[in-house]
Image (cartoon, helix red, strand yellow):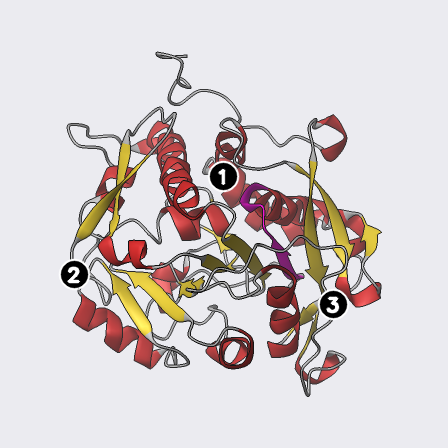
Amino acid sequence: MLDGRPTPGIGGDQYLPYERRTGNESIVCFTRELSAAGLREACSRVAGDITGKVRTGEGHGPNIIPPAWVREPLADDLPGATIVETNTCYEGSRGTAEQHRRALKVNGWDVAPVDILGERGTALLPVTGGAWFREMSVGADLLNYDSLLALTHFKGRTLGGSGGADENVGIGCADGRIGKAWIHTPVGTDDHGASARRKSMERMTESSKAVLDRFGRHAAFVNVMRSMSVSCDCEGVGAQPVVTPDIGILASTDMLAVDQACIDLVHAMAEDDRHDLAERIESRHGLRQLSRLEEPGMGNGRYVLLDMDHDDARIRATDAVAGPARSGADAPGAGGPAIRSLTGCERARPPHGVRAPSS
């Protein structure tokens, strides 16, 4: 520990089976239904009147969440919601607000108003108990919202870790020129290689902490485990081919629990099915994201997994991956709304400003 803070670059890089974890349990809701109806059901369990953040990805990206899935929940269940984005720190099709809006249109993200955070300046949020940061630079307009729904396409990442809710919020809310640069390579360093990736996971998670401290209980998380390439959506058409089977959609008001559940479901798959994605996540220090989330008490690594397809029965990760995910016409109720009660699932208290970020 340094001055009572965690020592950077140390610990938490091994997969810990569920039975060896300690602490409280959160609620994670799960459906195999990969469709607009499935996404709407998952969102209804946690979002209330919350706004969302969707990771939209590079133009023509083959693996992103289909925007058509998002249209109905936003229009009917989250009226007034705004999709929020931030520009990238690399040169590409989303480096400026103008470029970013073009990429959003190409990908079909015209389903709701869009706010490019950072377009009108930046703001600093405090990072309480950070090992790397005392504050994080975010798009200033983030402060205009009082709730956040992080709608995330779960996948691998070339730069390191896993692309879950932590990455969506930590990278996706940091502004493109300052915050993201701090996360990837801090000022005064030339950090590269495996050690750099591990430290980057810690910095990304500290950025998430700044955002979650800002929104408190007015934040919720939905992870879509579909088209899970080992590549980030920021690679667009250059992403590696998908070889991992689709699983389903998970939702929680606990960021750590929903990301941990995704990792657990990957580990519960047959070796041939999970190998590439698990290897990418673990070799690039994705598990450090989970342990860094847990260290300051940002969530629980233990959770109750509720099967929305079977009356909210409590299931294990192996049960969730035992049958194939359903999509489109194969999914019961896919032809219309399938909103059920919130029985068994935590729900964030409804704030009045909702936003949907994307990474």
Quick one: label 1 or label 3, which is nearer the N terminus?
Answer: 1
Could you tell me which residue is drawn at 56 percent across and 59 percent down?
222
Whichever of labels 2 and 3 marks the residue nearer the N terminus, that label is 2
Residue bounds of the magenta highlight: 248-256
Q: Residue 314, image x and y in percent?
A: 82, 51
At x 71%, y 66%, the residue is 32
Q: Nearer the viewer, mark 1 or mark 2?
A: 2
The residue nearer to you, when weighing 284 against 187, is 187
Residue type indicated by callout 2: Arg
Q: Nearer the viewer, residue 123 or 251?
A: 123
**Residue 321 locus on image (x, y percent):** 75, 56
Q: Is mark 1 on a helix, strand or loop?
A: loop
Front disc: 2 or 3: 3
Q: Which mark is residue 171?
A: none
Is residue 172 visible in this depiction of the protein?
A: yes
Residue at the location (31% across, 80% down)?
A: 105
Between the C-alphas of marks 1 and 2, the distance is 32 Å
Residue count near mark 2 (Cα–Cα under 10 Å), binned few <14, some 14–19, many ≥20? few
Q: For mark 1, what is the residue?
A: 286
Which residue matches tag 2? 120
In reply to whether residue 99 is colored magenta, the answer given is no
Q: What element carries label 3?
A: loop
The reply, left or right, for residue 329 in relation to residue 192 is: right
Q: Name the residue under label 3.
A: 341
Q: What residue type is labelled 3?
A: Ser
Name the residue type under label 1: Gly
Q: Is mark 2 on a helix, strand or loop?
A: loop
Residue 341 percent across, percent down from the top left:
74, 67
Q: Residue lying at the far bottom in this picture: please name it.
A: 335
